[in-house]
Image: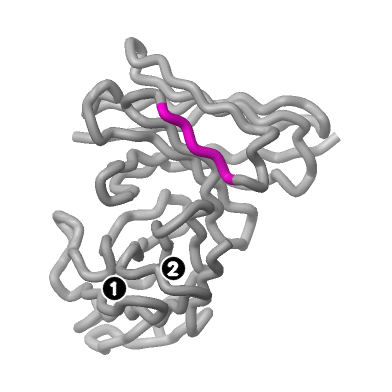
Amino acid sequence: QVTLRESGPALVKPTQTLTLTCTFSGFSLSTSDMCVSWIRQPPGKALEWLARIDWDDDKYYSASLKTRLTISKDTSKDQVVLTMTNMDLVDTGTYYCARTLASNWKFDHWGQGARVTVSS
Amino acid sequence: DIQMTQSPSSLSASVGDRITITCRASQSISRYLNWYQQKPGEGPELLIYTASYLQSGVPSRFSGSGSGTDFTLTISNLQPEDFATYFCQQTYGSPYNFGQGTKLDIK
């Protein structure tokens, strides 16, 4: 059974760095075709894809946020970490991680999401 | 960037109805289109991938079609658990944009 769970601070201040951890089970990120993506959703708005890391450590970022994002993995812990620098009020929302299959870009299992509020 | 436009943005229907949601891409994306269902407080659930392939475990009353720029999600014989928000997503090229969502509620 594949599960993913996001964790991190619920509240960050403007200009701070956000660090989110995705802890997963039921698959290995060292297996070919396996990837983990991060997606966010501002309140009442559409989903926005942020980044992806692959089993071979290839990384992909949203062009509009690339300078602020870093994605990494710890295969031994079954975790993927996303950092986002220089947080702003508009970054408030729910952040999801999802297992992604590289061969067909299926986001086939999602976490429940981590709510992040940016406020001073 | 490829923009995804869903219509309608909201829809009211009754149990047993058949409904269709449309997703239009700003340029051709071949068949690189996924559909998701999201219920309040939960993460999205994959329903359809590559335009028309039913994800394992998803009921057969869900179906997808289309290619190029125009795609549809059809739900036949609506069940109470189907009342949720639906999103399309293109996976043709980065950024892998989603549509703005279609909220399906009970009439």
Which quadrant of the figure has residue A75? top left
- On the image, numbered disc 1 is attached to which residue? B80
The residue positioned 40% from the left and 57% from the top of the image is B91
Q: Is residue A10 above or below residue B70?
A: above
Q: Per the image, is B2 magenta?
A: no
- Image coordinates of residue B42 in percent, x first then y, are 42, 50
Q: Amino acid at mark 2?
A: Thr
Quarter the N terminus of chain B occupies: bottom right
The residue positioned 70% from the left and 44% from the top of the image is A91
Which is more foreground, mark 1 or mark 2? 2
Q: Is residue B100 visible?
A: no
The residue positioned 59% from the left and 40% from the top of the image is A115
- On the image, numbered disc 2 is attached to which residue? B85
Chain under disc 2? B
| The residue positioned farthest toward the top in the image shown | A76
Quarter the C terminus of chain B occupies: bottom left
- Image coordinates of residue A61 in percent, x first then y, are 55, 39
The residue positioned 53% from the left and 79% from the top of the image is B9
Q: Nearest the camera: B13 or B49?
A: B49
